[in-house]
Amino acid sequence: MQMHDRPFLPRGVRLHHDRVRGVTFLLAPEKAVPLDDIGLAILELVDGKRRLSDISAHLARVYAAPEADVAGDVSEFLDGLRALMYLRAAP
Amino acid sequence: MTPQPPIAMLAELTHRCPLACPYCSNPLNLLTRDTELSTETWADAFRQAAGMGVLHLHLSGGEPAARTDLVALTEAAVQAGLYTNLITSGIGLTPARLDALEAVGLEHVQLSLQGVRAEIADRVGGYRGGFDRKMALAREIAARGLPMTINAVMHRHNLDDLEATIALARDLGAARLEVACVQFHGWAARNEAALLPTRAQTDAAKATIAAARRRLRGEMAIDFVPPDYHSDYPKACMGGWGSAGLNVTPDGRVLPCHAAETIPHLTFEKITDRPLAEIWYQGAAFNAYRGTDWLPEPCQSCARRDIDFGGCRCQALALAGDAGATDPVCSKSPDHHRIRARLAAATAPDADADTAFVYRR
Ligand code: SF4
Ligand code: SF4
């Protein structure tokens, strides 16, 4: 994923807050991925408009962490989802 | 230990189906239309399921499109908040019906594939013209941008077409392909000798899948259920009995797996008699093989105990005569020789002679 890419969840993949388990899941065909706080914070910013650079900058502010480190972590997380077809990116 | 809530529910809306696949997982005694649950009973079941933590709902059958209220059922499932997937052969769905399903929020379609050419697909499905109609419908699904998985059911007669199957799924615009080698329950058990793949086919399929996964990474996801008779260890059936999923039959019986009704000493409760959550948490059938405490040796002291939970109960019953035995697929099972014998008989060079399909009717 490049810094200028705009990641988005494709049709058929969505977030779902499960009140029974108290966990938010990323739901995809035949798959439910439980999200931790960081994963959720990232995916809540994934809307097809924000670029990877925007998302990283925002999270770096919120978590008071170096932007370069955050960008690396975010892009690794999103690339993993992309390989599984749970996420796509527009240029 | 309190059981976890279920993740997935498979709603077998009907056993009716225009096709007659010889590996159909439906039971040999098919339920008729007059026994089927009403729209409102299903809708209530969906709400109960969502309320107890079910995330995925699979609308299945038979052919779910045989229900005239499929759109209403889909709407009820979506309204309940469930991730709603339609498992279909495509026969009985029209473009107008697809539009209606899409309008009420259907999220995903899983289209079964009996073969990559009309000649083999229609022979397996026992329905002439089925392949062409399915292809036309697949294009309609793709044109709408509805997420689609192709579910290719594979066995001795089509496993050699695996590469072409992968290419066809790509061509149809599927984001996901499930290559499911036949499991020998229901009608498949009747047709075991005709369907069992050879060892060479199995090895070739594994190599083809591995290469395709590398090649198509990020373009199409591929799930593979290998033929377990050729495996050293069994699969974790349903992710563990009463652990992740449940099935509801057309007349409302709640089962831990498709084939559970073959186990004669268990009784299965109906959704019309007891709340779903009680059946899941307290029902005797769900607790019969839940967890691992009941497991015999060699499973009890095996490192894979918490990985495969001793395999499939129905397979243990069918092949070892005891639903509480180690799955005979396992190379450590004292009954494993039975699997070897069945494989040897079914895949001997002259075995094809008397293996006509017994169709599901
Ligand atoms: S396996 Fe074949 S016969 Fe059985 S429900 Fe599916 S399409 Fe119909
Ligand atoms: S012995 Fe039991 S637990 Fe171990 S691999 Fe075989 S079936 Fe699984």
Image: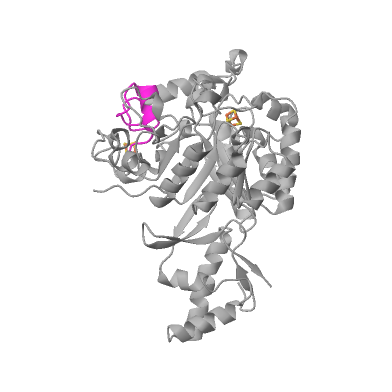
Front-most of residues B139 and B305: B139
Residue A33 in the image: above or below residue B252: below
In the rendered image of this protein, does residue B110 appear above or below residue B331?
Answer: below
The C terminus of chain B lies in quadrant = top right
Ligand 2 - quadrant of the structure image = top left
Question: Residue A77 magenta-drawn?
Answer: no
- Image coloring type: one colour
Question: Is B96 left or right of B55, judged from the image as shown?
Answer: right
- Residue furthest top as drawn: B354
Please, is residue B351 above or below residue B153 in the view?
above
Q: Residue at x 48, y 27 (%)?
A: B184
Q: Position of residue B227 (x, y in %)?
A: 51, 34
Q: Is residue B330 magenta?
A: yes
Between B86 and B96, the one nearer to me in the picture: B96
In the rendered image, residue B328, in percent from the top left (x then y), is placed at 37, 28
Q: Where, by quadrant of the figure, is residue A37 drawn?
A: bottom left
Q: Quadrant of residue B255?
A: top left
Residue A48 in the image, given as x and y percentages of width and height = 63, 71
The quarter holding residue B72 reads top right
Magenta stretch, overall SS: loop
Residue B328 in sight in this render: no
Residue B75 appears in the picture as rendered: yes
Magenta range is: B310-335
Whether residue B310 sits left or right of residue B7 in the image: it is left
**How many callouts does the rendering have?**
0
Task: Between residue B320 and residue B148, name the one nearer to us.
Answer: B148
- Residue furthest to the front: B40
B292 left or right of B247 in image: left
Name the spot of residue B79 as percent of width and height, x first: 52, 52
